[in-house]
């Protein structure tokens, strides 16, 4: 059996171990010295680094401990690879990507690419000639969907839809004025339009990967929590979400495309994201069952939400209405509204009742531009897979007004 190559770790290990030692990580250094030949030492080193990662708020963790975690993951993955345990090796490497630091990231990515190819050997032929196992059918009951929407939905101002919108038109009519718009025909060439509605494809390229998911109604609820699970298990959960006992599981605001290259290659960054001379800030996945809700909140950047699979209802309030939407006073939640649009307490939040808003049902193949600081509420009307593109504006936009 050939070895997983880790050229950066081989070169950087002495320096990293020295730095870890200087920060009191003597036990880790002792385990790491044996990790190449002993899986128990590799796992012990990973546990020691894990403890340091959870010793306080994430921003207070010394960066070298993130790199230490990556190193221990690479040692563990090399052991599992030698023993033909490809899925376990892939799981350990994903943990290194999700929790580790930047120094050894190229080694992690290279090892994942090698393992992904190994794990899928022979599968391309097996999946070659077949009918797609669709994630979402084309049948959609609009009347039933409307029954679950907040009061007054689709009765105020609908977001304008534009076809063949030029960059100049987008800049002058929407970007500079800070106005939302739906762009209807810019995703037809994306492989994702077909691939992501194919369960077999998703299982084949990502089934063995480990992803972070949110469990519960939404992040403002007390029973909300986060888990790390295999992507195949996540797919099973969202397919069974129709049962009354199930709790929604949502892959929300995760940089999935930095983690899984095959999915990144299925999409393209819209040219609109380069309007204004800014730069792309974040590329996130939003994937979950019908009924998943992102509560009313705002974000600091320009945002294009691309609806690849399924449908979503989205309600938008201008940034100028912030006071009337009762944002939380706590720093961590100051971009979130205390108002639950699904069950508005008009006694507690009287200003909300008569506010005007924009809303829409975003269909497959459509993109919604959300200006910075605009408040938005999002509800999935079916199983839904979306991509958000956040970008800065280079200081040229007046959209904050």
Image (cartoon, rainbow, N blue to C red):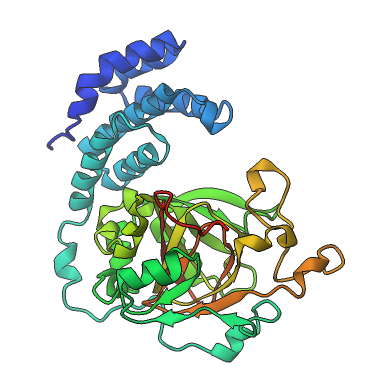
- Residue at the (21%, 57%) spot, across then down: 120
Residue 34 percent across, percent down from the top left: 30, 17
- The C terminus lies in quadrant: bottom right
Q: Using the image, determine if residue 55 lies above or below residue 135.
A: above
Q: Nearer the viewer, residue 184 or 259?
A: 184
Residue 286 percent across, percent down from the top left: 46, 61
Q: Nearer the viewer, residue 76 or 345?
A: 345
Q: Nearer the viewer, residue 244 or 319?
A: 319
- Residue at the (16%, 56%) spot, across then down: 121
Q: Is residue 105 visible?
A: yes
- Residue at the (25%, 41%) spot, across then down: 109
95 relative position to 118: left or right: right
Residue 202 percent across, percent down from the top left: 32, 65
Q: Is residue 44 visible?
A: no
Q: Can you tell which quarter of the image residue 310 is in?
A: bottom left
Q: How many dots with numbers?
A: 0
């Amino acid at each position: 059996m050939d070895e997983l190559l880790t050229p950066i770790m081989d070169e950087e290990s002495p320096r990293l171990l020295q730095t870890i030692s200087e920060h009191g990580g003597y036990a880790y250094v002792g385990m790491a010295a044996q990790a190449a030949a002993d899986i128990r030492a590799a796992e012990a080193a990973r546990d020691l680094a894990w403890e340091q990662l959870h010793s306080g708020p994430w921003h207070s963790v010394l960066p070298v401990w993130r790199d230490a975690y990556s190193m221990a993951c690479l040692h563990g993955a090399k052991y599992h690879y030698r023993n033909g345990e490809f899925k376990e090796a892939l799981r350990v490497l994903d943990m290194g990507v999700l929790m580790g630091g930047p120094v050894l990231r190229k080694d992690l990515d290279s090892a994942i690419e090698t393992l992904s190819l190994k794990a899928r050997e022979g599968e391309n032929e097996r999946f070659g000639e077949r009918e797609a196992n669709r994630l979402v059918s084309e049948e959609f009951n609009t009347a039933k969907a409307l029954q679950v929407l907040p009061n007054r939905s689709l009765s105020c101002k609908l977001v304008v839809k534009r076809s063949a919108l030029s960059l100049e038109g987008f800049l002058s009519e929407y970007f500079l004025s800070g106005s939302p718009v739906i762009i209807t025909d810019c995703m037809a060439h994306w492989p994702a339009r077909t691939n992501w509605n194919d369960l077999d494809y998703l299982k084949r390229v990502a089934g063995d990967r480990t992803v972070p998911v949110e469990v519960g109604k939404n992040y403002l609820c007390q029973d909300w929590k986060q888990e790390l699970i295999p992507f195949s298990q996540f797919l099973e959960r969202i397919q069974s979400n129709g049962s009354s006992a199930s709790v929604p599981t949502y892959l929300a605001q995760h940089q999935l495309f930095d983690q899984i290259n095959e999915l990144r290659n299925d999409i393209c960054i819209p040219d609109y994201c380069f309007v204004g001379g800014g730069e792309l800030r974040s590329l996130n996945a939003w994937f979950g069952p019908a009924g998943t809700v992102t509560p009313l909140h705002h974000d600091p950047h320009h945002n294009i939400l691309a609806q690849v699979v399924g449908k979503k209802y989205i309600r938008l309030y201008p940034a100028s209405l912030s006071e009337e939407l009762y944002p939380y006073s706590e720093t961590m939640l100051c971009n979130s509204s205390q108002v639950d649009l699904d069950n508005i307490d008009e006694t507690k939040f009287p200003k909300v009742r008569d506010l005007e808003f924009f809303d829409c049902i975003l269909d497959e193949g459509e993109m919604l531009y959300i200006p910075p600081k605009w408040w938005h509420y999002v509800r999935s009307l079916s199983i839904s897979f979306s991509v958000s593109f956040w970008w800065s504006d280079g200081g040229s936009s007046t959209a904050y007004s």
